[in-house]
Image (spheres, rainbow, N blue to C red):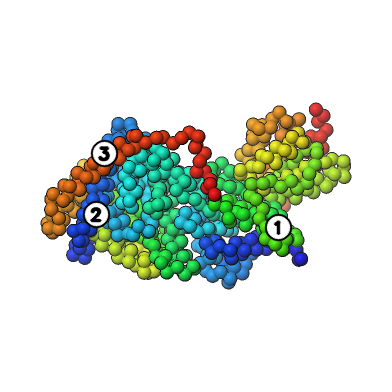
Amino acid sequence: MADTLLFNALREAVDEEMGRDDTVFVLGEDVGVYGGSYKVTKGLYEKYGEFRVLDTPIAENSFTGMAVGAAMTGLRPIIEGMNMGFLLLAFNQIANNAGMLRYTSGGNYKIPMVIRGPGGVGRQLGAEHSQRLEAYFQAVPGLKIVACSTPYNAKGLLKSAIRDNNPVLFFEHVLLYNLKEDLPDHEYLVPLDQAEVVRPGEDVTLLTYSRMRHHAMQAAKKLEQKGFDPEVIDLISLKPLDFDTIGASIKKTHRVIVVEECMKTGGIGAEIVASINDRFFDELDAPVLRLSSQDIPTPYNGKLESLTIVQPQKIEEAVEKMMALQI
Amino acid sequence: MAQERTLPVFNATDALVTAEEGLTIYEDMVLGRYFEDKCAEMYYRGRMFGFVHLYNGQEAVSSGVIKCLRTDDYVCSTYRDHVHALSVGVPARNVMAELFGKETGCSKGRGGSMHLFSAEHNLLGGFAFIGEGIPVALGAAFQSHYRRNALGDAAADQVTACFFGDGTTNNGQFFECLNMAALWQLPIIFVVENNKWAIGMAHDRASSQTEIYKKASVFGMTGVEVDGMDVLAVRGAALEAVRRARAGEGPTLIECLTYRFRGHSLADPDELRSKEEKEEWLARDPLKRFETYLLQQNLVKGSDLKAIRDRIQTLVDEAVTFAEQSPEPDPSELYRYIFAER
Ligand SMILES: Cc1ncc(C[n+]2csc(CCOP(=O)(O)OP(=O)(O)O)c2C)c(N)n1
Ligand SMILES: [Mg+2]
């Protein structure tokens, strides 16, 4: 079977779910006639029509709130954030209404909706288009936050997200849309709440997600040649975190390095370190290390940009350094 | 005191009510008034907490609009939501229990005064932030439109009524949603309760164009101005808006000129509004006005109205007893309702 590009894997997920359940619909900027800025909804407007693939005006907060209202009344909206950064304008609807309304309503309403789109640092897109909002949104109660990283998990996770009865923030990465992978012919789902052990190992646990999974794997290959055996875990679910998988790994390796693309301050890693201290402190042989993006607006200049995010070499060095600490 | 707008003249023969309809509307208005008076009493007696925004004076709007709706229509409110909840039929005891923070409250004691919800009554909320309910209401209207047009369900002709204040019409969500509602011809009615004030901000100090109904026209939407102290005027405008929305003829903006008889919330000292202004509006009390109308038209007898008032007073008193005697939420359920239990 031919390889599937990641953006097509996402499109297949949306298409299959729309075919299966006619309450599922897509809305966002340029999702319809234009086919989506990364072509994730290409052809769906022609197939499902203008209501089910709804081109909205550029009004992020309002169309997000509209999706909340539609979800409360029985539809299953999928919002495409043209770029996830634009959802800063929808912060209120995402936090107050998508995130908290089920609780404040005492369970009167459920809000089955997906907010998906491209995030992360791309190639010289400048600060505003290079945001990692997962870190900003993690404090909001009631949201599930998921990051896909391969065509296989992108498809299976998105299908699960669409079927979930809760609001799911679904992060894709601008630089991963053209990854290729041979996908199963049969239908499959990937659970939203399970981390993926990408490379089992004994020495040190690398906790990562989204594009950094691939940086971690590059580093792991080099480290392997040098005789190290790192375990690479793709978190998949950034909220809630899969502490079963994380814990099992820590009990084996006793060392953890978080590799993330969000900024260090208030990042996903900050939350992970705190939670590991709460739950698994006695298992640790070394302090948990964070490799994060610099705490700066992502610079446009290519050299500065690459210095801003974690490069595979930095991961290698960090593992070697941690392994050199003999406890 | 700002120059008062001339209220549009309304010819009551346009919206004649039967005795039965009249009594239903009257009862709803009395319920709104008595319930809120009781809230003030309970708040000052320390039985309810937080920000509590009362609706006294604006009853003609809630009753005038909601009593034209079917039970399967949707209603979306703000933080000033008690009376909208009552008008859609959420039992007074469950609203009162919510204000007392009890498990029997319509939001299970998790919401409070500004977060009243009832899926059973298609009450979409209770929204504490300015303007944030408008997109949600738009979504409910889109949902009806979707079922009807994308899924071919001819019975999906529900209408959504969305209430908010004058101050809220300066927020972007108002304009964004007017645009989308008109663009897609959604079955929604935007009901602006222009009570002249947004806490301490006089409407004419906040809006460059104070006649809010006129803002509909730039979106190609029908906008009407009504005397919000006259329940029949409101009803007349609402009936037409409901008819249009149900027929697929799109949204309407209704600006109701009204006034709140109390401070912004029970925590507001209400020092900015002049005595003359308050007196002028108090003289137009919508409840008294409708009572006079019903009697003058010989639609009902004074004793009918008194019977309603007595019954509602009892109902409100019982709501307090119910709320007082209800249990608080179980601490073991602190985390319940964060996520759907499938
Ligand atoms: C986003 C947001 N900003 C500010 C407030 C504080 N606030 C609560 S009510 C209010 C005034 C609203 O006035 P209006 O829309 O006229 O409604 P009214 O209270 O008169 O019914 C303000 C500023 C809020 N609740 N939400
Ligand atoms: Mg006001």
Q: Name the residue under label 2.
A: B25
The image position of residue B14, as x and y in percent, is 21, 65
The image position of residue B232, as x and y in percent, is 23, 59
Can I make out residue B280 in this image?
no
- Left/right of residue A122 with respect to residue A223 in the rendered view: left
Give whichever of A168, A123 is nearer the camera: A168
Mark 3 surroundings within 10 Å by alpha-carbon count, few (fewer than 14), some (14 through 19), many (20 or more)? some
- Return the disc, 2 or 3, that comes first in the chain's sequence: 2
For mark 2, give the secondary structure: helix
Residue type at mark 3: give it.
Answer: Asp
Give whichever of B176, B275 is nearer the camera: B176
Q: Mark 1 points at which residue?
A: A151
Q: Mark 3 points at which residue?
A: B317
For mark 3, give the secondary structure: helix
Give whichever of B30, B2 is nearer the camera: B30
Can I make out residue A46 in this image?
yes
- The numbered mark at residue B265 is none
Task: Look at the image and tell me in which quarter the N terminus of chain A lies.
Answer: bottom right
Residue type at mark 1: give it.
Answer: Pro
Mark 1 surroundings within 10 Å by alpha-carbon count, few (fewer than 14), some (14 through 19), many (20 or more)? many
Task: Look at the image and tell me in which quarter the C terminus of chain A lies.
Answer: top right
Q: Is residue A255 above or below residue A153?
A: above
Query: Are labels 2 and 3 on one chain?
Result: yes
Front tag of 3 and 1: 3
Query: Are labels 3 and 1 on one chain?
Result: no
Rounded to the nearest angstrom, the CA distance separating label 3 from label 1 is: 62 Å
